[in-house]
Image: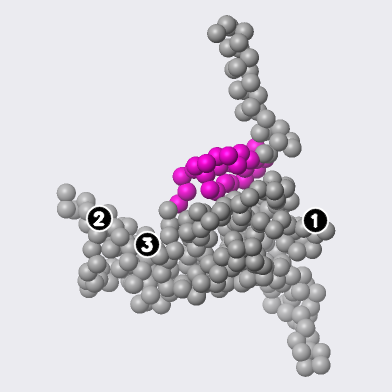
Amino acid sequence: MSESEKFFIRANEILDRLEGYLPGNNRLDFNTKSANCWSYNASSNKLEAIVRQTDISLDNLLCIDKQKHQLVQNTQQFLSEFPANNALLWGPRGTGKSSLIKALLNRFQGDGLRLIEIQRDDMKKLPEICDLVYDQPNKYILFCDDLSFEEHDHGYKIIKVMLDGSIKQTPDNVLIYATSNRRHLIPEKMQENLESEFIDGELHYGDTVEEKLSLSERFGLWIAFHPFNQEQYLSVIHHWLGKHMGTDTPLSDEQRQAALQWALEHSSRSGRCAMLFSRDWAGKTGLAQL
């Protein structure tokens, strides 16, 4: 190979890398066989394949059976070409909201389900991302974790229009699944509720509250998550200890006491808290046995 040929090959490689950073060139390589999920990179204005995705499964998500059933059914409708809704999963931190969405990908990726993760600040790019996937054969969930807005953040108005209210229709092969610690996504103040009034025996919210509620109402499916009670929390710990330590024996009094103390220290009896305790206990036990 001549020096000139080597030069042009190298130049083409550099141009290929630079192309993704140019405006209007946020194309996605759908031929990446090893990837079933992508993330949107705002700095380069493109979608990037995530090759090493999480291995969480639906079977590892305990004590949220009702929530799993609702979202699995909605996703199956979506994959089967039946009508399905955008979904908002809301509730306290660590209760399994985002894990449930990621587990759906692992369950249904063989059926053509794909996931695109988008940061809240990049939700304004939804129309461009939809344009990328509208003619693709798979089904795409656009996933935004921890979607919420502060009092004077008007970015929610853009997303509200995109969810339902824009002239441009969302592609049939796209759904939006979002998680939030807030049911209504935007903080509400007591003073705003004073605008409400009774008309013909019915409560009517004031304009301020109605505007804030209008965003979450664009999601057709609301799924609530709640903190675990003590027995649910301990049952999740039993499950994860069995995974980590290869045993199915009941929790000892020492383990129960340590687990409850861990929950007090972390101010949470959530699935995440249970998993972290189990990892800590199994790790310390394994190290002590060396």
Considering every residue shown, the one lying at the far top of the view is: 2
In the rendered image, is residue 159 in sight? no
Looking at the rendered image, the disc whose residue lies closer to the viewer, 3 or 2, is 3
**Which quarter of the rendering shows the N terminus?**
top right
Q: Is residue 30 magenta?
A: yes
Considering every residue shown, the one lying at the far bottom of the view is: 201
Tag 3, which secondary structure?
helix
Label placed on residue 208: none
Q: Is residue 173 magenta?
A: no
Spot occupied by residue 125 in the image (x, y as percentages of width and height): 71, 49
Alpha-carbon span between mark 3 and mark 1:
43 Å
Amino acid on which disc 1 is placed? Lys
As rendered, which of 202 and 18 lies closer to the eye?
18
Q: Which residues are magenta?
A: 28-54
Residue 15: image quadrant is: top right
Image point (71%, 68%), residue name: 218
The residue that mark 1 highlights is 168
Considering every residue shown, the one lying at the far left of the view is: 290
Amino acid on which disc 3 is placed? Met
The residue that mark 3 highlights is 275
Image point (47%, 67%), residue name: 95
In this picture, residue 227 sits left or right of residue 77:
left
Choose the circle earlier in sequence order: 2 or 1.
1
Tag 2, which secondary structure?
helix
Looking at the picture, does residue 178 appear above or below residue 48?
A: below
Looking at the rendered image, the disc whose residue lies closer to the viewer, 3 or 1, is 1
Looking at the rendered image, the disc whose residue lies closer to the viewer, 2 or 1, is 1
Label placed on residue 284: 2
Give the main secondary structure, helix, strand or loop, of the magenta stretch. Answer: loop
User: Are the residues flagged by discs 3 and 1 in contact, CB closer than 8 Å?
Assistant: no
Spot occupied by residue 59 in the image (x, y as percentages of width and height): 40, 65
Spot occupied by residue 221 in the image (x, y as percentages of width and height): 63, 71
